[in-house]
Image (tube, coloured by chain):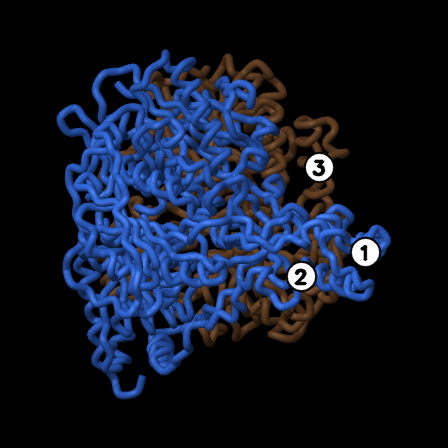
Amino acid sequence: MTVEPIVPNPDLVVVGAGCAGLAAAIAFKRARPEAHVVVLEKAAGPGFHNLSGAVLEAGPIHALLDIADPNWRDTPAARHVLGQRVRRDDVLFFTDARSVVSLKPALKAARSMGLGFGGLLHDGDLIVSVSQLTAWLSDLATRAGVEVLHGFPVRDVILDENGLATGIRTIDQGLDHERRPQPNFLPGEIVHAGAVVLAEGPLGYATEDFVARGGLVRNNPPVFSVGIKEIVEVPEERYAKFGSGRVMHALGWPLWTPVVGPAMFGGGILYSMGARRIAVGIIIGADWNYHDFIPQDAYARFKEHTLVQRFIAGGTVVEAGAKMIPEGGFHALPRDPETGAIGRKNVVIVGDSAGFVNVNKIKGLHNAIASGLAAGNTVAASLHAPAEIAPIYTRELEAQGVLLEMNGARNVRQTVARLGNLWGLPLSAVTGLFPRISVEPDRAAMTRESYSLKLKRPFDKDAFVAAAKVEHREGQPIHCEVLDPTLCATTCAETFDRPCVKFCPAGVYEVIQGTMKPVNPTNCVHCKTCQNKCPYDNLRWHPLEGGGGPKWEGM
Amino acid sequence: MSHAIVLVKQVPDVSKITDNAFDPETGNLMRANLPCVVNELDVQALAFAARMQALQTGSGGRILVLTMGPPAAEEALRFCLARGADQAVLLSDRLLGGADTWATANPLAYAIRRIQRDLLDGSSDVYVVAGMQSVDGDTAQVPAQVAEELQVPCVAYATDVERVDDRLRFTRIISGGRQIVAPLRMPAVITVASYAFPLYPTVARTRWAQRAEVVRWGAADVQARSIGSKGSKTTVIRVFPPPKTSRRCEDARDAAGLARALETSRQVTNAPTARSNRRYVLPRHRADPLDRSFEGLEKQVQAFKDLARILRDRGATDLASIPTDVREQVHGELDASVGKAAVEGMMQNLSQVDPSYRGDVWVVAEEQGGEIHPATFELIGKARDLADSLGVKVGTVLAGSGVADHARPLIEAGADTVHLLDDPRLSPFDPGFHRKVVSAAILRHEPQIVLFAATPQGRVLAPMVSYRCECGLTADCTGLDILDNTRRGEVGILHQTRPALGGNVMATICTRGSRSQMATARPGVMQRLPPDPARTGEVFHEPVDLQEDDRHMEILFTEVGTAHVNFDADVIVSGGRGLGSREAYERLVGDLSGALARRFGVTVERGASRAAVEEGFSDRSHQVGQTGTAVGPKIYVALGISGAIQHMIGVANSQTIVAVNRDPQAPILKQCDYYLVGSVEQIVPEVVRVLEGENP
C-alpha cells in the first residue's frame, strides 16, 4: 500500500452498533446531515453480538424508526422484525418440575394498585429478535449516511489534558499467543472525533476504562443477571399449541423453591418468534451463591419442566447464546460526581453500558433506544460546546422520564439480593418507598454450597458454543486474563474449587493438571460473566480481534 | 519496485449452502440466494502481495485487485481496498457469465494486459498473485491458465516469501516437501496455498474504501477471445447431492467410550465398497441396435426405452429414416415428458453408433526423486477400464531425466504404450518445460482422454497443458465414466464427476469443443491394478524441443521427507496444529501409538497434518493428505486436526476415522466415525490409561 487514504474525521464516533448506539448515530445524522458519524462494532456483522429477550415497548422504537425512515411501516423488514405483537401473556410460578401456578391475578392486582411489579405484564408489546432488530437498524443507519463499520474492537477513549475526548483507539491486532507482533501486526488505530458515545452493552471494555479514568462513580456496585437463551425450532403441532404472539415468564423452580430448594433471582422465558420457532431462555441473578453452579444446568432443568416440554419436545436448537443483563438500576448508573452526568464532557454512556434496565419490567431495550436518541440529539445540538454534552444528555434523559422510570424500579434487585426471593420479591414491589438500599457486587455472594438441581450428565457446552456460531482466530493472545494465577491455585481451589470452570457458559476455563487456565478462549461468547462473578475479582475480559465472537442472527 | 495484481473471487459462503441453492433446470448455482464472502485464499493472497511489497525497497509499487463477477462482486473489491489494496478493477458483464475456467482465465488475462497498459504505465514489473483455488470451484486452474495465456512463469502453491540479494524467493509446496524458487521472468503468476497472516482493515481505509472509485470494465473493454458459457470448453450436465457420508459421526462421550470405539473398529472388516458399474459397451457392439441404456441421466435411459418400444411396435427398423407418421406418434407420446427438441434429437441421433472421439486413453505420469507417484498407477488402472470400454489403448507419457527404467512398471500396471520425454532439463519439475513437451506429445498423438493426478504438480501442469492444447479440463474428479449423450449426438464420451462447493454438491461435467477430454483425479480415489509382469507394451522416445527461455523458475532449494515411513500400517495416529508443540506431538502421538500397538498387536505409524509439519512438530515424510501421502489404514486417529479438505481427501480410504478435537465446530467431526470434543492433553492420557488397563 502506497499512500494512506485521506478521509474526514468523524464528528461523532459511537462505540458499539447495538440498538442504543445505532439510535444515537441515526438521531445525530438526521439532525446534522452534513456531519460524519462512525459507529465501530467488534462483531463481524450487524446483530451478531446482540441478544435479548426481547419484549419491547413500542414507543421508543417507533420514535427511532420514524426518524430513521418515515416510510418504515411499509417495508418488508418492518413486518419481518416487528411482526409479532404480544397477544397472550402468562406469568407463572413453577413450584417443581411438574406443577404451575399462575401469578397473573396477583400481578394485575399489583398493577391496579400502582405497585412496580405490575410492569411484568406485557400485553400489547412487541416480541422481537434483537439481532434482527439491530441488523435492520444498521441497514437504516447506513442508508441515512451513518458509517457503520464492523470488526473494530475499541480499546479506550483518548482524553486530552482537560478531560475532553479527542477520539478513541482500537485494539492492537495481529499479535501471537505471547503478544509478539506477527507479520500482519496492526497497532491500535486512533480515530479522532468531536464526541464519543459509549454503547458497548454490559460491562463495556472502553466504558469501564473510561469510568475509572474519568472518575465516574456508581453509588451502588453494578449487579447483573446472566441470560441463557436458545432459539428452538419445534414441530408444527407444538408451535400451534404454544401459539404465536405469546410470551411466558416462569418464576420459581428450578431457580427458587420456597424454604428448602435453591434460592436464586430470575426466571424462565418462552416467546413465540414465528416460523415454528420459540425463544427459550432463563435469566439468573448473578448473585447466586453456589460454587458449582452452571447456568445451563438451571436452563436445562427449565426445559425439562412438563409445561415447557409440552411446547418444545422434539424441537431442535437452531441458535444459542448467553449474555449479561445489567440490573443495578438507578443507583448503579455511572455518574460524573461534579455534574451528575451519565458520562463526562463530550463522552456519554448509553444503553446497557450505563445500565438502563428497568428490573420491574425486566426490560431495558426501550430505555437503551431512548438513551441513544437522547445522546445523538444532544451531541448534534452541542458539538460547539463539547464540555456540556454529558450534562445536557443527562437532563434530556430526565426530561424524557427515562431516569424517573429507572428511579421507580431502583430497589428491586437490591431488595431481593438483601432479603432473598421469599421476602424480597413481594417486598420489592413496595421498596420504591425506600431511598436506596446498598448491595454487594455479585462476586461477593459465593459460598461453598452446592446447587441441588445439578444435571446428572454434564450439559453439552460444546454443542451450545457451536449453536452460538462462535469463531475466533486461534493463536491470538489469551483474552481472559488471570491476574494472579496463584490465587486460583491456592485460595480459590481450596475454598470454592474454581467456580469459573463451572459457570462460564462457553466452557472457556478448565483445570488441566491441577492448574486453572482459559484453555478454550476461542469458545468465548463475550458474555463477560467471568469478570463479574470470579469470587476473587481475579479475571479480566479483554476484547478479541475484530470480527470474532458469536454470529447470532435470530437472538 | 514491482506492482501486484491480486486476483480475487467472491464466492458463496459454502457453510450456508442448502439444497435449494441450485437451478434444477440448468444445474447452475443460484448465487443470488447465498450470502457471499471473499474467497479465503484470495484474502491470504492479498496479504501475501502486501508482504511482497513490504520486502521490496523503493517506492511506487502498487497493489491492484481484479475480480470477474456480477456487479455485487464490487463488495469483494471494497473489502480488499479496506485491507491494503490501492485500486480495484471489476470485470463484469452478462456476456461473461456462466464461464468455466477456460473462459474465466482468458478474459482475466486480457484484463491484466489492459491493467498493465492503462493503470500501470505499461509496466511489466508485475506479479499476478492469486489464491491457489477458490472454495466454490476448488479447481486451482484459473491462475495457471492465466499464466499460460500471458505466457509468463507460474509459481504455484506458495506459502512464504523472502528477499535475498534484492530478489524475491518463494517457498512452495511440492509433493511430500517444499521448495524455494524464484521466477525467471516478469510478469509472473504466484498462487498462494496458505499464508496465515491475513491483513486487518483499518478504520480509515475502510471508510476510504466505501468512497473509492472502482474501475468497471465490460466484455467489450477487454476484447477477450473466449468468454461466457459460449466460450467455455466444459459443460455441467448434472448436479446432484453428494452421497450421504458413510461415516457414523458418533460422539464417543468420554475416554472410555473412545477406547471402546477403537476396539470395535479394530474388529470391523468392511471391504472397500465394490463399484457395481456395468461396463460401457459401444453402440456398434450392442446386441440390440435400439439399446441406449448408457445415457448419463436415468430419465434419458427411460425416454430411449419408450422410443424403442414405439419404433419396435411400428416396425421402424431403418433408424436413419424414420417415417413421418412414426415420428409424429413419437412426438405425441413423448413430447410432454421429454420435450420436443429433445425428442427430435433422440430420433435424429439414434442411428449414430460411432464414438465421438478417437484416439487412446492417456495418463500423464508423474515422477519425483526417481519414483513414480502412486497416483499414476491408480490412474492407469482407471484408464485401462475406460480404454477397454472404448476398444482403444492405454498410453502414458512420462517426462523427466533418465526415465527409461520407469517404462516397465508403467506397462505392468496396465499401460500399452509409454511415451518417454527424456531430457536433463526435465528434472526436477519445471512447469514451463513440462507443459511444453507434454502438450507437444498430446498434440502429436491426439489421445481422446488425458488423465492427470491432482497432485501439487499435476494441478499446475494439467491446466497449462489443457490451455495450450485448447481443451477443456475438469479438476479433481472422483468418478470417470464412459457414457453416451445420444440426444446430442455424443457417443462414448467421458463423464467427469467431481465434488464442488466444498463437497456440498457433486457435478458431472463433459468436455466440449476440444480434441481431447482432460481431467485430473484425486490420489487415492482410483484403484490400481496388481502389477502384471507378463504384460507387454511399446515404448516410444518422443522428441523434446526446449529452449532455455521456456524455463519458469530457478529452483534454489528442495526438501523432501526421507525418513522411512510405513503408511501401510494397520493404524495411523496423526497429530495436527492443535497439539501445540513438537514436545506434545512426540508425547501424545507417541503414547497413543505405543498403547494401540501393545493392546491390539498391530503395526502403528505416526502421521501429521501439513500444518503440524509446517510448525515443525514432525518430519515431512509423515505428512498425510493431498499434499503428503494418501493413506487408507484400518483405523486413522486424528489428534488436534481440524479436517481441512486437503487433509480429509488424503484419509478418505481409511476404514474408520477417529478424531479428538477441542473445537466443536471442527470440520473433521462431521467426517469421522467417532469423535470426542475436548483437550487432547486431557483425553489422550486417559485413553492410554484405559487401553493399558484390563478391560477397555
Looking at the image, residue B294 sits to the left or right of residue A182; the answer is right
Check whether the beta carbons of the residues at disc 3 and disc 2 lie within 8 A of each other.
Answer: no
Same chain letter for marks 3 and 2 = no
Label 1 amino acid? Answer: Val
Dot 2 and dot 1 residues touching (CB under 8 Å): no
Work out whether residue B158 or residue A471 is closer to the camera in this orientation and state it: B158
How busy is the neighbourhood of tag 3: few (under 14 within 10 Å), some, or many (20 plus)? few
Which residue bears the numbered disc 2?
A: B301
Residue underneath mark 1: B330
Residue B26 locus on image (x, y percent) = 65, 46
Residue B245 left/right relative to A268: left
Chain hosting mark 3: A
Please give the label number shown on residue B113.
Answer: none
Q: Which residue is mark 3?
A: A59
**Which lettered chain is shown in brown?**
A
Where B339 falls versus A280 (above or below)? above
Residue A325 percent across, percent down from the top left: 52, 49
Asked if residue A231 can be seen in this view, the reply is yes
Which is nearer the eye, B7 or B228?
B228
**SS label for mark 1:** helix
Q: Classify mark 2: helix, strand or loop.
A: helix
